[in-house]
Image: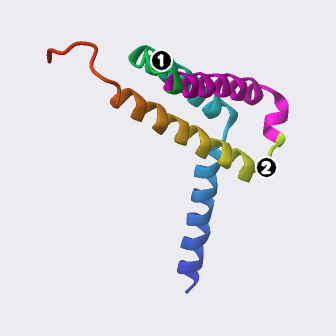
């Protein structure tokens, strides 16, 4: 009985620590840099599609904006829920960029 409670307390602490590591400002800076790099790659792989280019440009601008926000001291004052929502948005944008890169047509007709 007591051992179960102790185990539950340690699990709770471990999950809280993991959440805190996921929403640190440095993690957001790293994710924003990765997103900007992916946006540049996606822009190069889909050069002719203007609708896709607009989405890629928007994602790139949002990643730059988020990097500026994460670098400010006020970012730490945001609630964990808000930062977690921002993290989910970053992950969603990353998936979108990866899908656009994967769905881009081949630049040549011949397979390499």
The N terminus is located in which quarter? bottom right
Quadrant of the image occupied by residue 5: bottom right
Q: Is residue 101 left or right of residue 81?
A: left
Whether residue 75 appears in magenta in the rendering, the answer is: yes
The residue shown at (54%, 79%) is 3
Quadrant of the image occupied by residue 60: top right
Magenta region, residue range: 52-76
- Percent from the top left, x then y, of residue 33? 57, 22
The residue shown at (67%, 38%) is 24
In front: label 1 or label 2: 1
- Quick one: label 1, few (<14), some, or many (20+) residues within 10 Å? many
- Percent from the top left, x then y, of residue 25? 69, 33
Q: Is residue 80 visible?
A: yes
Q: Which residue is mark 2?
A: 79
The residue shown at (62%, 69%) is 9
- Quick one: label 2, few (<14), some, or many (20+) residues within 10 Å? few
Query: Where residue 63 is drawn, which disc sits there?
Result: none
- Gap between marks 1 and 2, in whole Å? 33 Å
Q: Residue furthest bottom?
A: 1
Q: Is residue 92 left or right of residue 42?
A: right
The C terminus is located in which quarter? top left
Whether residue 79 appears in magenta in the rendering, the answer is: no
- Percent from the top left, x then y, of residue 51? 52, 26
**Nearer to the camera, 10 or 48:** 48
Q: Is residue 30 visible?
A: no
Do the residues under discs 1 and 2 have CB atoms within 8 angstroms?
no
The residue shown at (67%, 42%) is 86
**Nearer to the camera, 14 or 49:** 49
Q: Which residue is mark 1?
A: 43
């Amino acid at each position: 009985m007591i051992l179960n409670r102790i185990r539950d307390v340690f699990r709770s602490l471990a999950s809280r620590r993991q959440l805190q590591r996921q929403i640190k400002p440095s993690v957001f800076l790293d994710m924003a840099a990765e997103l900007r790099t992916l946006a540049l790659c996606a822009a190069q792989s889909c050069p002719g599609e203007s609708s896709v280019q607009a989405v890629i440009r928007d994602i790139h601008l949002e990643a730059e904006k988020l990097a500026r926000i994460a670098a400010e001291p006020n970012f730490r004052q945001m609630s964990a829920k808000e930062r977690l929502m921002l993290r989910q948005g970053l992950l969603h944008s990353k998936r979108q960029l990866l899908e656009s890169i994967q769905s881009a047509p081949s630049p040549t007709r011949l397979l390499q």
